[in-house]
């Protein structure tokens, strides 16, 4: 898996892929991370990159002992298909 980073200055998780950048914007509260939007460059879509990004972001959220709120449809759909992250849902 590629390396997902938390760009706290821009409030987003990022993943570099083939010269492009996929990202997931978020808002943070003391106990939760609300992922508000995910975006993958058009040329890189339909390759599972957004799923890889969300998976890595959820791992970082878990490592910080926070909960997640799916503020965008993609994240909500991902969480519904991956019950291993159910414990993170706020």
Image (cartoon, grey):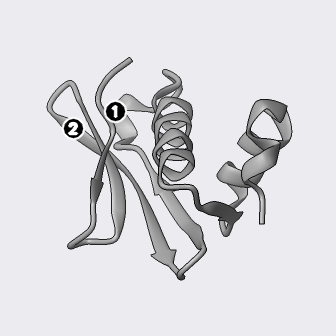
Determine crowd level at label 1: few under 14, some 14-19, many 20+ residues with C-alpha closer than 10 A.
few
State the residue at coordinates (34%, 43%). 41
Residue ID for mark 2: 20
Q: Secondary structure at mark 1?
A: helix
Residue 60 in view in this figure? yes
Asked whether the beta carbons under mark 1 and mark 2 sit within 8 Å of each other, the answer is yes
Q: Is residue 78 above or below residue 32?
A: above
In the displayed structure image, the side of residue 65 where residue 3 appears, left or right: left
Q: Nearer the viewer, residue 29 or 16?
A: 29
Position of the N terminus, as image quadrant, is top left
| Gap between marks 1 and 2 measured at Cα | 9 Å
Answer above or below: position of 65 versus 34.
above
Residue 64 in the image: x percent, y percent? 48, 55
The residue drawn where x is 56% and y is 65% is: 35
Q: Which residue is mark 1?
A: 43
Q: Is residue 30 above or below residue 84?
A: below
Residue 43 image point, x, y percent: 34, 33
> Residue 59's spot in the image, x, y percent?
52, 39
Q: Secondary structure at mark 2?
A: strand
Residue furthest top in the image: 1
């Amino acid at each position: 898996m590629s390396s997902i980073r938390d760009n706290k200055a821009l409030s987003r998780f990022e993943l570099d892929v083939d010269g492009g950048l996929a990202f997931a914007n978020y808002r943070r509260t003391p106990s939760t991370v609300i992922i508000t939007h995910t975006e993958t460059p058009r040329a890189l879509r339909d390759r599972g990159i957004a799923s890889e990004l969300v998976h890595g972001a959820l791992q970082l959220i878990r490592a910080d002992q926070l909960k997640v709120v799916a503020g965008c449809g993609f994240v909500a759909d991902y969480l519904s298909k991956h019950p291993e992250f159910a414990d993170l849902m706020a």
